[in-house]
Amino acid sequence: MKHIKLSLIMVAILGSIITSTAVAQVENSSASTNAPAQTAPGAQKKRPDRVQLLDKAVTLTDDQKTKVKAIYEDQDKQAKALFEASKGDRKTAFEGIRKLQDETNKKIKELLTTEQQTKFTKFLEESKQHGPKRPAPAQ
């Protein structure tokens, strides 16, 4: 009887090991290069209007809003292209996107007055530390 119980316990342990190994292989195979192409960060989620956030931080003119919107749209196109060109290599994609973000910030800063540039620098620092300051939800 002891021998049968011991055998059943061994079978149960072996079964759980086999199951966990199979699950791990399935998870790894879905992360392989045969997995569906990834999309650019933020493409699946609705993110807040960046122009509106920046306007709240630095008080943009209408002309500046139009130009900043075009800069952000160009950035989005380039980020998507970088992500697709990386063929799933997230590290390479994010390195390129980080450089692109720096270029975008430089272009925006060139549009701003000296006072706005100071506010923009503060806005970027806060964004890096805590994420952008978003307006409180309406109640």
Image: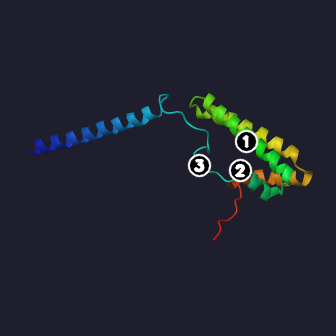
Q: Nearer the viewer, residue 131 or 3?
A: 131
Q: Is residue 10 above or below residue 125?
A: above
Q: Which residue does the numbered mark 3 point to in the structure image?
A: 45
Residue 64 in the image, given as x and y percentages of width and height: 84, 49
Front: mark 1 or 2? 1
Farthest left residue in view: 1
Q: Which residue is more in the foreground, 101 or 80?
A: 80
Q: In the displayed structure, does residue 58 sit left or right of residue 137?
A: right
Q: Is residue 77 left or right of residue 123?
A: left
Front tag of 2 and 3:
3
Q: Is residue 130 above or below residue 5?
A: below
Q: Nearer the viewer, residue 24 or 53?
A: 53
For mark 2, give the secondary structure. Answer: helix
Secondary structure beneath dot 3 equals: loop
Crowding at dot 3, Cα within 10 Å, few <14 / some 14-19 / many 20+, comes out as few
Give how far across and how far down residue 42 sits, in percent. Answer: 62, 45
Task: Indicate the quadrant where residue 98 lies.
Answer: top right
Please name the amino acid that badge 1 sits on. Glu
The residues bearing labels 1 and 3 have C-alpha atoms spaced at a distance of 16 Å
Q: Amino acid at mark 3?
A: Lys
Amino acid type of the residue tagged 2 in the rendering = Lys
Earlier residue among tags 2 and 3: 3
Q: Quadrant of the N terminus?
A: top left
Q: Is residue 27 toward the left or the right of residue 2 in the image?
A: right
Please name the residue that numbered disc 2 is placed on: 128
Image quarter of residue 138: bottom right
Q: Name which residue lies at 91% across and 51% down.
A: 114
> What residue would you read off at disc 1?
73
Indicate the secondary structure of the residue bearing disc 1. Answer: helix
